Amino acid sequence: MSSDSLKDRLVQSLRAARDKEAALLALDDDSPPSHAGQWTAKDNIAHLNTWRDHGVRALEAARRGTAFEGPANDADLNARNAEIYDAHRGDTAAAVRAAASETYAALIEAVNACTEADLLRERPDNGGPVWRVVPGNGHGHVAQHLSYWAVEHGDPAGAEEAAKWGYALDSELFPENQPVADYNFACFYARNGRAEEALHLLGAALRSRPDLRAIALEDADLEPIRDDPRVESLLGA
């Protein structure tokens, strides 16, 4: 576990995310998707860029003590992500790569501009302290999309490696947020129908954070294992 300040740990996580995302940037070009509805590397990076900008604006609002302009929570997330896709699918690969560099720099700058007190300020949507938008829109999001990409391209081992990377970074840098890390890692295994691995992590998350049960009851990631009697018992469904 790192003994660095919260601010330093957040910056470390963003630098690690930037390095990890380089694998996706290397695939970024202007080729169309192989079939309708499939996201290209460019689409994934544009999506990550937009949510990093969301993190920047959330931190700036906390620092200034102003209302956050933009989606404050994850309500209707699918609709929001569809809007992002439509807004950026015409962007060039070069523009998306440039934006990736800019959004990482902007998010690191926003973290550094905050005091520890700013980072610990509660979000207006009862989403916990504002600092959590950084891993959520930083390395956690990168791990998620690298995992999606690997699955879509027939690389289950690569998908698990990306998920494990994100989980290990969470555990090392943000032990105070371990239940959320456990929950997110459980969701990876659940999405891939691996109930045994998911159950241990999901149980640990819910024991530490019972409030996560409300999210789990509606979470589409858990659908592949939701009918497992052990999951039903765990969720009280």
Image: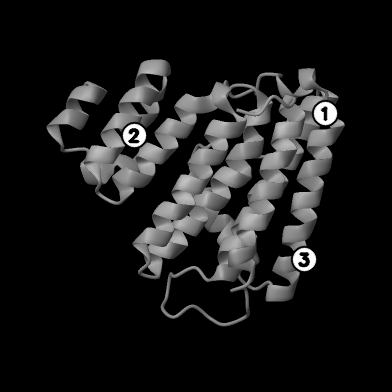
Judged from the image, the secondary structure of the residue bearing numbered disc 3 is: helix
- In the image, residue 181 lies at what x, y percent? 48, 33
**Residue denoted by label 2:** 218
Q: Nearer the viewer, mark 2 or mark 1?
A: 1
Q: Which mark is residue 35?
A: none
In the rendered structure, which amino acid carries the disc numbered 3?
Ala
Residue 202: which quarter of the image? top left
Judged from the image, the secondary structure of the residue bearing numbered disc 1 is: loop
**Residue denoted by label 3:** 98
- In the image, residue 73 lies at what x, y percent? 57, 34
Label 2: how many residues lie within 10 Å, few (<14), some (14-19) or many (20+)? few
Residue at 36%, 21% (x, y): give it. Answer: 206
Task: Mark 3 or mark 2: name the one nearer the start of the chain.
Answer: 3
Judged from the image, the secondary structure of the residue bearing numbered disc 2 is: helix
- In the image, residue 223 lies at what x, y percent? 26, 43
Q: Which mark is residue 114?
A: 1
